[in-house]
């Protein structure tokens, strides 16, 4: 039986991003607000936004592209679904509820960005689902009482009631994550479902399957701790790599970031820090050793001396092997039949992990390649250990 990504951290049970998705769906079905907790850069915010603006809307038949984002003052029309996001770092108590004299008496008004909080909104009966995300709720503990009221009592101020079709997800760091967050209070904890989110290299690769640049996959496969999780090795105040920042870097690479342009090294460093930048550029520079790759694949027997230099399991050799896989992906994207030459070629390296890495990436890069004879033989060969 396959192992779960869940693990125990003290008395906390943690879940991965992919494990959290169905859990959040269950909570949504029951109207239970969810808090995604965990260290910085685990992907909590991306998960919150993905659930509120795509997964949950689609589950109830709402087209995500039709959702109205109301933070800038835009309001949904009759029947339209909407999304609004708050950041606890920017909200003081008076931003949630502030005193106002209305009709000769003291009233407690609420921020106009809350769903149906003033006349800029249509009445709740005229609106579709309302999705609300709240970031960084643990940064200002004085606000937790407002979150507790909103999420559970579904009321705030003197006269505000949360519409029945509004659904909340929030994020927070834990107090021991060195991120400036405080303990959540008992009255708040008892009103929400808290999921402790962690990420692993395997889950990151699976969660973003099909969207990752081959160079990113190669770096993670080679040494995830030195590329995907570097916070513990970075000096305080220095940039570090985590799933969130690597995902952003992946976006730049997919859009054509030129790693040969020297100033871009500073850009990468500013995004993911020293360790991951070093890993990325070392992997990229290994490409220099692969200028003869086409000839190796076509006629490996005539180039065994050159190939032999990469077969060794030293660090440089392994990095070059994984860089080679990244280059091979580009070939598969153009021509799925190339796998019939690549799989026999990779067997020369006597590295099952390398073969399987290529196999997994092939299925994403060009699904047509999975119908080729050598791909089918590859899956059959490694079925018991890697594929089933």
Image: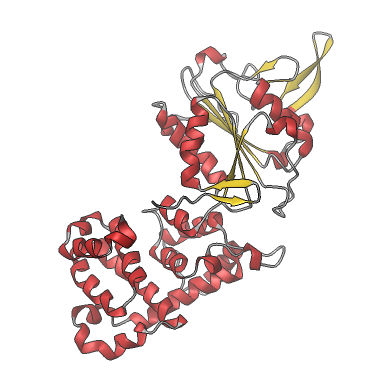
On screen, 274 above or below 199?
below
Report the residue at 57% width, 52% height from top: 42
Q: Quadrant of residue 328?
A: bottom left
Q: Quick check: can you spot residue 104?
A: yes
Report the residue at 53% width, 62% height from top: 228
Report the residue at 22% width, 74% height from top: 344
- Residue placed furthest toward the front: 1
Q: How many marks?
A: 0
Q: Is residue 231 left or right of residue 83?
A: right
On screen, 4 above or below 129?
below
**x, y (%) of residue 92?**
77, 35
Q: Quick check: can you spot residue 263?
A: no
**Image color mode:** secondary structure
On screen, 88 above or below 148?
below
**x, y (%) of residue 63?**
40, 30
Considering the image in quadrants, where does the C terminus appear? bottom left
- Residue placed furthest toward the top: 103
- Observer-nearest residue: 3 or 209? 3
- Residue placed furthest toward the bottom: 305
Q: Is residue 216 left or right of residue 328?
A: right
**x, y (%) of residue 244?**
55, 54
Q: Quadrant of residue 160?
A: top right
On screen, 12 above or below 222?
above
Report the residue at 57% width, 63% height from top: 272
**x, y (%) of residue 39?**
63, 52
């Amino acid at each position: 039986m396959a192992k779960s990504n869940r693990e125990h951290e003290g008395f906390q049970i943690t879940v991965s991003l992919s494990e959290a998705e169905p859990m959040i769906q269950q909570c949504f079905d029951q109207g239970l607000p969810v808090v995604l907790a965990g260290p910085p850069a685990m992907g909590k915010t991306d998960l919150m936004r993905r659930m509120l603006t795509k997964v949950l809307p689609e589950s109830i038949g709402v087209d995500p592209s039709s959702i109205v984002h109301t933070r800038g003052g835009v309001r949904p029309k009759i029947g339209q679904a909407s999304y609004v996001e708050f950041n606890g770092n920017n909200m003081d108590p008076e931003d949630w509820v502030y005193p106002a004299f209305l009709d000769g008496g003291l009233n407690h008004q609420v921020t106009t960005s809350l769903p149906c909080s003033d006349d800029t909104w249509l009445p709740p009966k005229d609106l579709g689902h309302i999705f609300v995300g709240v970031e960084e709720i643990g940064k200002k503990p004085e606000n937790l009482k407002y979150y507790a009221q909103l999420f559970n009592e579904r009321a705030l101020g003197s006269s505000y009631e949360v519409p029945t079709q509004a659904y909340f997800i929030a994020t927070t760091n834990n107090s021991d994550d060195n991120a400036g967050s405080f303990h959540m209070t008992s009255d708040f904890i008892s009103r929400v479902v808290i999921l402790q989110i962690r990420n692993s290299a395997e889950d990151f690769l699976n969660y973003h399957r099909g969207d990752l640049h081959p160079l990113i996959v190669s770096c993670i496969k080679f040494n995830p701790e030195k590329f995907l999780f570097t916070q513990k090795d970075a000096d305080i105040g220095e940039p570090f790599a985590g799933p969130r920042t690597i995902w952003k870097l992946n976006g730049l690479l997919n859009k054509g970031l030129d790693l040969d342009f020297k100033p871009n090294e500073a850009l990468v460093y500013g995004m993911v820090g020293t360790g991951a930048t070093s890993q990325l550029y070392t992997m990229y520079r290994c490409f220099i050793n692969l200028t003869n790759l086409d000839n190796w694949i076509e006629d490996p027997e005539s180039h065994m001396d050159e190939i032999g230099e990469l077969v060794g399991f030293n660090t440089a050799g392994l990095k070059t092997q994984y860089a080679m896989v990244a280059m091979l992906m580009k070939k598969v994207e153009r021509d799925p039949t190339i796998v019939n030459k690549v799989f026999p070629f990779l067997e020369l390296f006597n590295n099952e992990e390398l073969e399987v890495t290529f196999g997994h990436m092939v299925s994403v890069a060009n699904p047509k390649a999975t119908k080729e004879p050598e791909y089918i033989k590859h899956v059959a060969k490694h079925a018991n250990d890697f594929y089933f």
